[in-house]
Image (cartoon, rainbow, N blue to C red):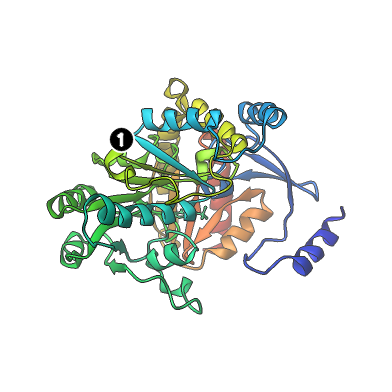
Amino acid sequence: MDPKKLLEDSQQFLMNTYKKFPLVVRKGRGIKVWSTDGREFLDFVGGIAVNCLGHCHPKVVIALQKQAQRLIHISNLYHIEPQIKLARRLVRNSFADKVFFCNSGAEANEAAIKLARRYFREVMGQNRYEIITSHHSFHGRTLATLAASGQEQLKEGFEPLVPGFRHVAFNDRDAIKDAITKDTCAVMLEPIQGESGIRMHDPDYLRDVRKLCDDNGILLILDEIQTGMGRTGTLFAYEQFDITPDIITIAKGLGGGVPIGALLATNTIAAAFQPGTHGTTFGGNPLVCTAAIATIDVLLEDGLILDQCRRMGTYFIKKLEELKSEFPSIIADIRGMGLLVGMELTRDGMPIVLSCIEKGVLINCTAGNILRFMPPLIVTEKEIDKLVDVLEHIFDGLS
Ligand SMILES: *Cc1c(COP(=O)(O)O)cnc(C)c1O
């Protein structure tokens, strides 16, 4: 179809929920994508941390093809082999004992909120329901996860929101301490805040919060939807903060591109879910679980990709720091872990994103002035150099 006609139809037939760039991406391989008008791009957005193995990784493609011929969907009323095998892999490689599968990040967080509440009612026999979350946090767009999120502008016009959430200052241990009441059931945090601009806590913060939760008998839920699946250089980010959470949620990179989310918890907590308490038609369907198995197997094979992610992350941040010393009036801060990297600008980031597209690189801007980079974990030095060259060229034109 003619690219211009596609853009017209897009406006006519789709609800206007995304600010879209005038670009139709048709094909992808590894870190590269191609648009319908024949241009080639390096993709440093990676589907917002989804395409962790790059586009159309052959092992994921072949797994999907085979499974599509065998069985695409079957109800959760029956045991599903790929679902069982995927759960086993997630449990074997985490703190958790049990997994619940769903279809997105928001759904995983919804399930976590329901599980935390029900755990206290059913297992502990206590009426605790309130969850403490952090300012600037992002936990999803459903009504409960929106209420959980610490960003007021996302909530405008959607009231009344789901009650039972209390928001505290980011990275402030004492604020959490003061917010805990007899009604509190959990603290829910992103190990690194993604959407609000790669905000990192102090190194000891999560350990302190873990202790606060233990001292008060409440749960620690980590939203690893963006930080999980190798993004920060370990399968889950919590591993690097030296803590064990009670519940984590994952999605984004889990399926290597297909929509799947998961809730992971210990046996004691998972016992609060019994037949009939929670469910979803598509959750953990054979097709998506097969893709996720292929993805996690490639990620964990000899630890090669995680190792590459850590090395490339260090290289990337070093190169961006060099850029920062070259353009101190444009770049305010560089931060990140593994290949979840942010560059805080002293100005609006959108013009930079548009210039990058013109020069053949896709990058993301979040929270107005933060350039966010989430390339596939297979990114190479050469590709990072290309991005840094493009940015240098653009910044040169600004100063
Ligand atoms: C993306 C994201 C979500 C929401 O996931 P969806 O799949 O878009 O519903 C929730 N929490 C965090 C930390 C995220 O990055």
Q: Is residue 35 visible?
A: yes
Residue beneath the point at 48% across and 30% down:
84
* Residue in the picture at 57% in, 64% down: 350
Say left or right for 190 vs 168. Answer: right
Measuring from the top left, give residue 217's x and y in whole percent: 17, 52
Pick the residue in front: 119 or 131. 119
Q: Is residue 198 left or right of residue 70?
A: left
Compared to 98, does 207 lie above or below? below
Rendering coords of residue 39 (x, y %):
75, 47
Closest to the observer, 300 or 281: 281
Task: Characterize the local packing of mark 1: few (<14), some (14-19) or many (20 or more) Cα atoms within 10 angstroms.
Answer: some
**Label 1 residue SS:** loop
**In which image quadrant can residue 216 be found?**
bottom left
Asked whether residue 322 is in view, the answer is no
**Which residue extends farthest top?**
302
Of residues 136 and 360, the one nearer the viewer is: 136
Residue carrying label 1 = 95
Q: Residue at x 37, y 67 (%)?
A: 150
Residue 107 x %, y %: 48, 54
Amino acid type for the residue under numbered disc 1: Phe
In screen coordinates, is 128 left or right of 149? Answer: left
For image coordinates 50% across by 63% down, the residue present is 141
Q: Depth check: give the residue in front, 170 or 283.
A: 283
> Residue 125, image x and y in percent?
22, 55
